[in-house]
Amino acid sequence: MAMILTVTLPSGKKGGGEIFLQTASAAGPDPFTPSTSIQDKDAAASSASKSSAGADGGTGTLVVNGSHPGLYGGTRNVASCDVEKQVKFLTQNSDKAQAFAGALNIRQSEIPQYMGSLTPTRLVWDTRVTNHGYKSGAATSYQAILQAGTAVLIDNRGVPRVRCACGNPLTPPVAGEGKQKFTGRQWSSFQPSNLVVVTPTEKPMKAVTMFDQERKGWFQRPSGDLLGKSDEEVPTPKGQPAETPFPVLPPPASPEEHHDKKEESPEKDQPKDDGGKRDNDQPKDQPKDDDTKKDNDQPKDQPKDDDTKKDNDQPKDQPKDDDTKKDNDQPKDQPKDDDTKKDNDQPKEQPPAPVEPPAPYSPQS
């Protein structure tokens, strides 16, 4: 996404958006250490080529993921920074080491390990950062634009962390208020509309895909390879034109494209909603409801109700009632009644006295 950023003053308070321009080799104000930059052959080539490549330009600061191929460059098998030299200097200067560690949010004792995890590269694009200087025993901070060709150490998320020309810690840029104001000498290729801000990758990178301007080729440098001795040549990455004289950045997303994506999103999800609706309302499921209804209301179940009714009310059960009536009223059963009477007179037969059928089973009911 292309976006315009304003910045903070060195004091850390939001102000008028003052940004300091720093050329590739200049130490700049209040350096932490002497320069540890190694002038490889690619340094001048990166800066010179950027002058013509930047002419196409964008319309704002381009936010680029730290893993984008060609975001960084250098000379294959040659490191751009002397990390061991910087670690040694900080070890011998405890006050600066403490301020250095604080700016990067690490412990002072972790400096050697942390520096050993970084990867030496060179910026291929003019890049926005928060730079830090050392003054009066403490770290200062200010917004800066580093020229393409600047030697930097990046972490395994692709974010610049140390500027080798001054040993300064680097962190992502900070937005401020007001109109941008550039301070310092501008280089010939500088264009305010052609800047890069690096965002960290979601996962740590195993290697950085870099561009060798001198050879016009691509190579990968393993993360944490301080000397560049494990660099490997690789084919042109996807998205980069073959035989390109210079890497290209991803195009910025226009407002129209974002609008289209928002419009497309509901359509993309619509089938899921339709599918849910079909499961609830469409004829596909109707047979299930019909079957249930059939089980409750259709003639298929009627015989069951009829059978029950027959058992209760139909002539099939009448003989039982008749038989019962016969047992109660007919002469054939009179002897039985006499016998019953005799049995009733006898204490032994007293329990079975009721002979009348229950009311629900009576023909009149």
Image: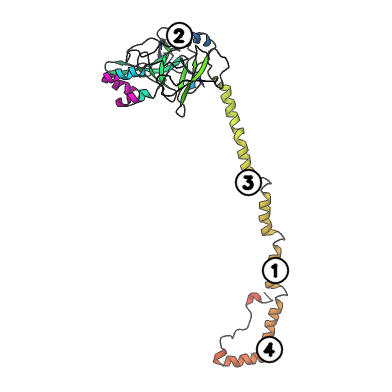
Decide if residue 321 is in sight here: yes
Which kind of residue does numbered mark 3 sit on?
Answer: Asn
Q: Do labels 3 and 2 touch, CB within 8 Å?
A: no
- Place of residue 153 in the rendered image (x, y in percent of width and height, measured from the top left): 40, 19
In the image shown, does 34 or 57 lie closer to the viewer? 34
- Which residue lies under the disc numbered 2? 44
Q: Report which quarter residue 27 is drawn in.
A: top left
- Which residue lies under the disc numbered 4? 333
Which kind of residue does numbered mark 2 sit on?
Answer: Ala
Which kind of residue does numbered mark 1 sit on?
Answer: Asp
Mark seen at residue 307: 1
- Which residue lies under the disc numbered 3? 280
Mark seen at residue 61: none
Real-space Cα separation, disc 4 to disc 2, in angstroms: 130 Å
Real-space Cα separation, disc 3 to disc 4, in angstroms: 65 Å
- Place of residue 211 in the rendered image (x, y in percent of width and height, measured from the top left): 50, 16
Real-space Cα separation, disc 3 to disc 2, in angstroms: 68 Å
Q: Report which quarter residue 94 is drawn in.
A: top left
Q: Which residues are magenta?
A: 90-113
> In the image, what residue occupies the spot 70% across and 81% down?
322
Label 4 sits on a secondary structure element that is helix
Disc 4: CA contacts within 10 A as few (<14), some (14-19) or many (>=20): some
Disc 1: CA contacts within 10 A as few (<14), some (14-19) or many (>=20): few
Image quarter in which the C terminus is found: bottom right
Q: Does label 4 or label 2 sit earlier along the sequence?
A: 2
